[in-house]
Image: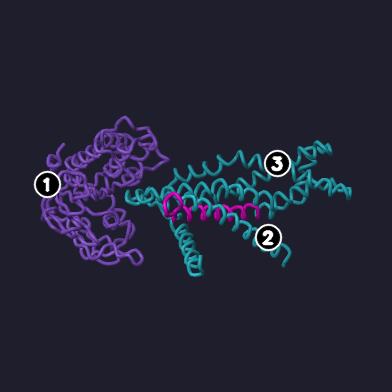
Amino acid sequence: MEANDMAKQLTIPIDSSRPVISIRGLRRSFGDLQVLKGVDLDVYHGETLVVLGRSGSGKSVLIKIIAGLLRPDAGSVRVLGKDITRLDTKELQALRTHIGFSFQSSALYDGMNVRANLEFPLVRNKRHLSSGQIDAAIAKVLDDVGLSQTLYQMPSELSGGQRKRIGIARTLILQPEIMLYDEPTAGLDPVTSVEINDLINEVQERYHTSSIVITHDLTCARAVGDRLVMLSEGQFVRQGSFEEVFETDDPRVKNFYNYNFITGP
Amino acid sequence: MNLGRFFLRIYAIWQFIRRFFKEVFLPPYEYREIINQFFQVGIRSLSIITLTGFITGVVFTKQSRSSLAEFGATSWLPSLIAIALIRALAPLVTALIIAGKVGSNIGAELGSMKVTEQIDAMEVSSTNPFKFLVASRILATTAIVPVLALYMGFVGLMGAYLNVHHNEQTSFAAFFQNAFNKITFLDVWVLLLKSAVYGFTIGVAGCFNGYNADQGTVGVGRAANTAVVISMFLIFIEEMIIVQLVNYFKHGG
């Protein structure tokens, strides 16, 4: 498939008057290393935003702050209208039921089979559900990710692509409004990567989510992104459509493009 | 490790323990995971505790017999063994076995979950990983080690009885009457109390090192290793302190 053919086709309307995530002046350091140096960002309802950047550029730190896994040193992070830096533990837990996080390593619970992995967030956050409703919810998300046959398999018995899909299914079971994908195609072969890209688009269509996708894979960025931002040395250096981002002579952006194995725009 | 880092670590452990006491009493309670951990710590350790307890009883009896025989006092064997088992050997040996078996397992399991982002995954799915993983495990070790220590004491006495019966033809009733003659309720309470302290120590050491593991697979190995070494070291320190305290209260200093 040509790279240009991979541009995202399926989209729900983006409502640019409704930012679901709004970040201002975000700073975060680890010891003497300043990873984020005053980042501003808006993600709108229905949008899939791709954050590009080299390894160690702070992409994962950014979404871990959005999910409340890391605390920023300075700045505000409003998610669905709430500043996560000011929420107490209970409020943060309540907000997290609206946020899905797909980890780079899939982060499936090794000691539990697929069913138990999917059941885990559901029984803790929707305690009123009957066992029949839980079974139906599990069957639906497994069907949505195309892995109905894996219900009683252990994570160790799944392939890398299947683990990614189950990881995504586990987040979808709570029907989140926002999806955060950390390197969704990392470590996957090209065919499986395309399948995961398609799944990200299908999730947005079916669940009407707004998403942030962290990646350094330009094929993935082109396939899923409505808008791209490029993070370099702790700041966003470019943003726009795929073509807009890479129509520049900025060496930080050009080098990043040239080292990816896709045909030019 | 320099002195500053050492005190920072002590402070972090203190905070960890404080958090445990805060989380363990607050709902929601992870009943299923607590029962699962009781099973993992208790039932899965039963065979090794049975074996070591029985061997301890037999070996200690055989080793003591010759010394007592020199004074014609082999009839004291049951009470001597009972005192040794209930006051010292059963809680100490049980704790050391559980530290090696369960403590290392907790350190490795939580460490592996930490470095593969499974703990983060629990957190973003609005589950409190500390309550689910840490509180349940510390609760299980604290509650189960006393039960296992009491069980080991019983199995050890059974081993001792078989040996004494074989050599001195002592009856079951006479052996246990003689054995319990010197054992008081205080001895049993102290066994339960100090075993609970050891269990708590094993749980905290395993969970703290696993929950704070870093640096990938190296960190997992280190967490498991540190959990065992630290808990064994602390168990001996605690044994010394508890013996001093018990003697102080028993004999008024």
Out of A96 and B4, give the one closest to the viewer: B4
Q: Which residue is mark 1?
A: A265
The amino acid type, in three-letter code, at marker 2 is Val
Residue A45 coordinates in the image, percent (x, y): 15, 51
The amino acid type, in three-letter code, at marker 3 is Ile
Magenta region: which residues?
A: B190-218
Q: Which residue is mark 2?
A: B243
Q: Is residue A124 magenta?
A: no
Chain for colour purple: A
Q: Residue at x 34, y 36 (%)?
A: A159
Chain for colour cyan: B
Quick one: SS at disc 3? helix
Q: Is residue B193 magenta?
A: yes
Dot placed on the residue nearer the N-terminal end, 3 or 2: 3
Mark 2 surroundings: few (<14), some (14-19) or many (≥20) residues within 10 A? some
Q: Residue at x 38, y 47 (%)?
A: B118
**Label placed on residue A178:** none
Would you say the residues marked 3 and 1 are in contact, meaning their CB atoms lie under 8 Å apart?
no
Question: Is residue B9 placed above or below A257 in the rendered structure?
Answer: below
Residue A239 coordinates in the image, percent (x, y): 14, 56
Q: Which residue is mark 3?
A: B55
Out of B31 and B4, give the one closest to the viewer: B4
In this rendering, the label closer to the viewer, 3 or 2: 3
Q: Residue at x 64, y 46 (%)?
A: B150
Q: Quadrant of residue A126?
A: top left
Q: What colouring does the structure picture have?
A: by chain
Q: Would residue A108 appear left or right of A76 to someone viewing this image? A: right
Whole-angstrom CA distance, mark 2 to mark 1, is 77 Å
Is residue A86 among what the camera can see?
A: no
Q: Quadrant of residue A245?
A: bottom left
Whole-angstrom CA distance, mark 3 to mark 2, is 25 Å
